[in-house]
Image (cartoon, grey):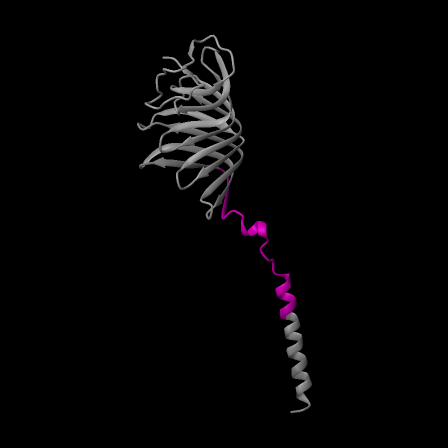
Amino acid sequence: MKKNTPLKGGIILVMLLLLSCHSTEEPTPSATNAEGPDQEGWNSKITVTSNGRVAAHVEYSHMEKFSKKRQVQFDGGIKVDFYNNKGKHTSHLTADKGLLFEDTNDVEARENVIAKSDSGITLRSPSLKWLNRTQKILTDDFVTITTQKGDTLRGKGFESDQNLKNWFIKRPTGVTQKKFELPKSARKPLEQEALPDSSAHEKK
């Protein structure tokens, strides 16, 4: 028994060393991996719904889903088609990047954002957010609006319905051939909402 003891001890020692070496080779999650996406996807489409109906289609090149944040991030370019309550297509948007907030189904577009309505209005801005519940689009960034007739108005801060029919710029700075109302004290509300003092909106 005494002669076998060193042999058994040696075997146990070798096994412990092997186990120790194996554990060090296993990858440990870094801080980046721990906060990384749960899912990824390429060249596909996400359907955004509201009360059981299709509100928007988001087509993307690359998608990363973060379950803890309840967010879906898009890069490599996105295309978004919006639909009204009756299922009719109203506008189309393109951007370099995007973000979908899963709790509200709101969509935020970033970098080189271009939105075009089916009525012929074109909006350009560094960023734009679409609110699913109210079906409005808005931004605090600079915007450039071009009508189907080629009239242009620029400014900072923008809000509109997703059809780009009823819209206003909070701080207009551009030139246009079209008549626009610059309200001072008395102003006509947009969809029953008061307009800010320094605002310009399309006059019907």
Q: Residue at x 66, y 77 (%)?
A: 13
Position of 32 relative to 161 (above/below): below
Which quadrant does the C terminus fall into?
top left
> Is residue 68 located in the magenta-colored stretch of the structure?
no
Q: Residue at x 43, y 19 (%)?
A: 197
Q: Residue at x 39, y 36 (%)?
A: 48
> Is residue 35 located in the magenta-colored stretch of the structure?
yes
Q: Position of residue 125 (x, y in %)?
A: 51, 24
Camera-side residue: 174 or 15? 174
Position of 188 relative to 68 (above/below): above
Camera-side residue: 68 or 74? 68
Toward the bottom, the furthest residue is: 1
Q: Residue at x 38, y 13 (%)?
A: 203
Camera-side residue: 200 or 204? 200
Q: Position of residue 172 (x, y in %)?
A: 49, 17
Res 2 → quadrant: bottom right
Q: Position of residue 81 (x, y in %)?
A: 42, 28
Which quadrant does the N terminus fall into?
bottom right
Q: Is residue 172 left or right of residue 105?
A: right
Query: Magenta residues?
Result: 19-43
Toward the front, the furthest residue is: 185
Camera-side residue: 188 or 96? 188
Q: Position of residue 195 (x, y in %)?
A: 39, 21
Position of 106 relative to 88 (above/below): below
Q: How many marks?
A: 0
